[in-house]
Image: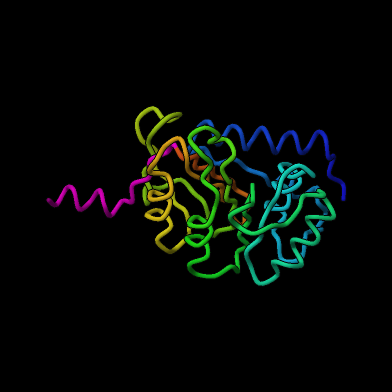
Amino acid sequence: MKLDVVHDLQSVYRKLVDSTSRPGLISDLGKEAALLDGENAAGCSRSLLLLALTLLDPEVTFKVYGSEAEAVEGEINQLTFAKAVQADQADYLFLLKDAGAGYLEHAIENANPGTFANPHKSAVIIAETGAITEGDNLLLSGPGIQTKIGINVELAGDWIEKRNEKNREYPTGVDLVFVDRNHQLLSLPRTTQITESREVEKEWVM
């Protein structure tokens, strides 16, 4: 592993913060991912592993979804000393690309939303997905976005509806982070409003 655990992981963290403060901004983790020199945790992508190395430590907990979940949890534990727990107790939930249909919705439903007194104790869900690109399938608005911004996320399911339900009582809720096969990162904090393009088309028709 050629990764500099101080300099390079700080770079990953800055990119995550930038994409969180400016929802819709796609950050490229390709440079840092290449430094892992092909090493990864079982079926875990290098981008997701980078985020695990950046965010996890012995003081936080996590949960992995996927066919190799147990093996990935064991390796991440060895690398970060973070403890694997049940979903509703986890600070971070990681969804591998082979987790299957419905698992993101399941993770959102079971994730800890925090409390009104301690919303910062809510979970962050980090999911591997298909391509993340600029586009107009999803329209984002809210803090950090001047008007609206379009994005494409290659991900099926009813996760947007489930996310809206989970985040309906602000400031509680969950934050989402997506990484794709090209090491592109997209962050969707709970304050970001997401509208699917087909919903906009319906409004115009009506």
Establish if 206 lies above or below 96.
above
Q: Residue at x 57, y 35 (%)?
A: 120
Residue 199 left/right relative to 26:
left
For the rendered model, the colour scheme is rainbow
State the image coordinates of residue 95 (x, y, percent, origin top left). Answer: 60, 59
Magenta highlight on residue 60: no
Q: Residue furthest right?
A: 1
Stretch of the chain drawn in magenta? 191-206
Query: Outermost residue toward the left?
Result: 206
Please tell me whether residue 204 belongs to the stretch shown in magenta: yes
118 or 199, nearer to the observer: 118
Q: Quadrant of residue 99?
A: bottom right
Instruction: Locate residue 12: give its quadrant.
Output: top right
Residue positioned 44% across, 63% down in the render: 156
State the residue at coordinates (67%, 44%): 29
Judging depth in this view, the residue of 120 and 118 nearest the camera is 118
Of residues 159 and 138, the one nearer the viewer is 159
Residue 41 pos. (x, y %): 77, 60
Query: Residue, x 33% and y 51% (percent of image)?
Result: 196
User: Quadrant location of residue 121?
Assistant: top right
Q: Is residue 138 above or below residue 68?
A: above
Image spot of residue 68 (x, y percent): 70, 70
Is residue 200 rendered to the left or right of residue 115? left
How many numbered circles does the render carry? 0
Picture coordinates of residue 49 (x, y %)? 73, 52
Q: Is 167 on the left-hand or right-hand side of 8?
A: left
